[in-house]
Image (cartoon, rainbow, N blue to C red):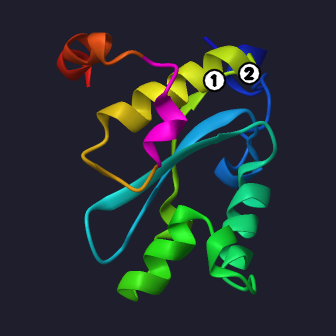
């Protein structure tokens, strides 16, 4: 049966990954199994651009952990394949999601101070899920 629903598609245009905002993301190293988990309310491409430009800073003490890893190991970061792990409008829920993903990654570059508000008591439950 021919009807208009076959020809007219409704819905929103799909947003490109790097145009999305309010996300939790993971950036992998191309040369080893280390990764970094972060969250941002801005567009993902804006945050990635900041990481890429971070290496140009004059003082070593103010470098991000990603830039420090790049300098110390001479490794390359897999910027184009940054993975969105979660999308959440609520800042509080996004922060919890980020902490969960930081705690459950295998070899993380994140500082453990990023997860101080997340008790280790919950880790056995999370390891079953992830």
Q: Are marks 2 and 1 in contact (CB under 8 Å)?
A: yes
Residue 113 among magenta residues: yes
Dot 2: what SS?
Answer: helix
Within-10-Å neighbours for mark 1: few <14, some 14–19, many 20+ = many
Residue at image point 73% right, 56% down:
47
Q: Residue at x 68, y 62 (%)?
A: 48
Q: Residue 94: which disc?
A: 1
Which residues make up the magenta segment? 111-118
Residue 126: % across, % down: 27, 17
| Image side of residue 111 versus residue 49, left or right | left
Q: Position of residue 92 (x, y in %)?
A: 69, 16
Place of residue 1 in the rendered image (x, y in percent of width and height, measured from the top left): 60, 11
- Residue 98 in view, yes or no: yes
Residue 96 against residue 50 in the figure, above or below:
above
Q: Is residue 102 magenta?
A: no
For label 2, the residue is 91
Residue 77 seen in the current view: no
């Amino acid at each position: 049966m021919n009807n208009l629903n076959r020809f007219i598609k409704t819905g929103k245009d799909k947003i490109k990954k790097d145009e999305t905002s309010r996300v939790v993301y993971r950036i992998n190293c191309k040369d080893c199994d280390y990764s970094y988990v972060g969250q941002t309310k801005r567009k993902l491409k804006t945050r990635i651009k900041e990481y890429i430009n971070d290496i140009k800073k004059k003082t070593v003490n103010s470098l991000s952990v990603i830039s420090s890893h790049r300098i110390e190991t001479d490794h390359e970061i897999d910027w184009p394949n940054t993975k969105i792990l979660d999308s959440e409008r609520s800042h509080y829920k996004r922060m919890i999601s980020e902490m969960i993903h930081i705690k459950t990654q295998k070899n993380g570059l994140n500082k453990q101070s990023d997860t101080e508000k997340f008790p280790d008591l919950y880790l056995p439950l999370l390891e079953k899920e992830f």
